[in-house]
Image (tube, grey):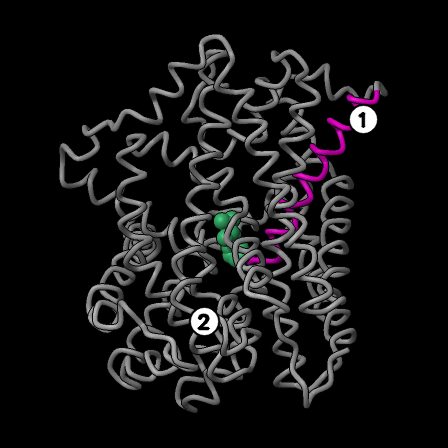
Amino acid sequence: MEKNSQRSQWGSSFGFIMAAVGSAVGLGNLWGFPYKMGKGGGFAFVIIYLIFAATVGFVGLVSEMAIGRKAKMDALGSYAKIDKSAKFIGFMATIVPFIILLFYCVLGGWVLKYAFAYMMELFGSANLGFAGMDGSTFFTTFISEPFEPVLWFVIFLFLTAGIVTLGVEDGIERSSKIMMPMLFAMLLIVVIRSVTLPGAMAGIEFILKPDLSVFSSLESTVNVASIALSQVFFSLSLGMGIIITYGSYMGKEQSIEKSAIIVPLLDTLAAVLAGFAIMPAVFAFGLDPSAGPGLMFITLKEVFASMPLGNFFGFIFFMLVFFAAISSSISLLEVVCAYFIDTRKMKRKNATILVTLLIFLGGIPVALSYGTLSWVKPIMGMDILDSLDFVSEYLLMPLGAMLMCLFIGWKWKPQLIIDEVEENGFKFKYATYYSFLVKTITPFLICFILYKSSIEAIVKYFIN
Ligand code: PHE
């Protein structure tokens, strides 16, 4: 049980790493990374991605873990405790996950629906014409219905909330320790199936052969770099209070530096494996690898429909995507609940009920944003789901991360973070590298993402 005097902690380093990997490995890895890799020159994209992960990603992870573990509060409370004038960054870091949850749970609901449909097929009960419809018809019919997307959204949200109510060690840590190893195992099963399909070679080549033509012009280089950089941010769950909150449950005997290396490695491994799970199969059946967001919900349905034992592999695949999605939404929900628990001194159960209720109410219009409410275009002609994604992921998240680096680098000084990393006799091997990056390159690069991913679009929109 949590008492206010005795704050929750992770039971072990392994548990913390699994929870952080749980947050990191999500729809971004399984769905975003493969298609971005498809558009960004295959292995060329992976290389740029790794460079950004080792620089900007490493700096972000170390900083957030250290801030959280030093202050031992929720994201807003942590910033406020370290520096009153930085409270607004903590506020942004708490509001972003709230907004993301509104649509992440809707997407999670779609994944659940697919997992359920494959399970029904597997047990031989024909599910509302799932097998009979082509991928695209099925998907568009489903997301534009007035009831089903809401239903699956609610189920997904309640499952997330159920785990968060159980607390840090008994809920988040325990579920991650089960789900993450299973996720990797299931991913391997799908990879093996995919790469052994006749005709899979073209897909393997597509991933492994760097297509250097993406670097042939400055414009396309800049484009690919900005996609890779924002993918690193989103994928490592940075800039939205998550790693601060999870870091606040770390004990002083856990190594921040080591965690900041292991988490991105496992996260990238999952993303690359997802590429190997998807691309070879897509090529083997002659489908389009750069189908974009439709890849997972439309193209893959065609893939599983043509594959021997397709329902079985479809079920395994969507279960693993479900594990990835729910462990990410748990981390989002924990940030917001931690605010009510630490700063507002609420009991965990009440905090979870309150936040879940707010997301339930706010999420319904999002679940309807491709159907009943598809006429609502809140921001620059985008539907509700895309508008929320834009504000949170593309605007507030990089803004918060950039401010964090500027505060650490120039106001608090990197030594504050280094001291925290070196608590308990640890040596921060990359301290000089960290200080240099956090002051200069990282805020500059984040500013670049901010410009490429939102400011540029806003300016263009208003000029036209
Ligand atoms: N990191 C997760 C992914 O790659 C997504 C995520 C983003 C999770 C933001 C939590 C917060 O999909």
Please state if 415 lies on the left or on the right of 178 as rendered.
Answer: left
Res 236 label: none
Of circles 1 and 2, which is in front? 2
Query: What's the mark number on residue 65?
Result: 2
- x 58%, y 54%: residue: 328
Binning the other alpha carbons within 10 Å of mark 1 as few (below 14), some (14 to 19) or many (20 upward) gives some
Q: Is residue 308 above or below residue 341?
A: above
The image position of residue 433, as x and y in percent, is: 22, 67
Disc on the earlier residue, 1 or 2: 2
Q: Secondary structure beneath disc 1?
A: helix
Highlighted magenta segment, given as a residue range: 100-123
Magenta portion: prevailing SS class: helix
Amino acid of disc 2? Met
The residue that label 1 is drawn on is 120
Q: Is residue 262 left or right of residue 97?
A: left
Picture quarter with the N terminus? bottom right
Q: Is mark 1 within 8 Å of ligand 1?
A: no
Q: CA distance from mark 1 to mark 2?
A: 42 Å
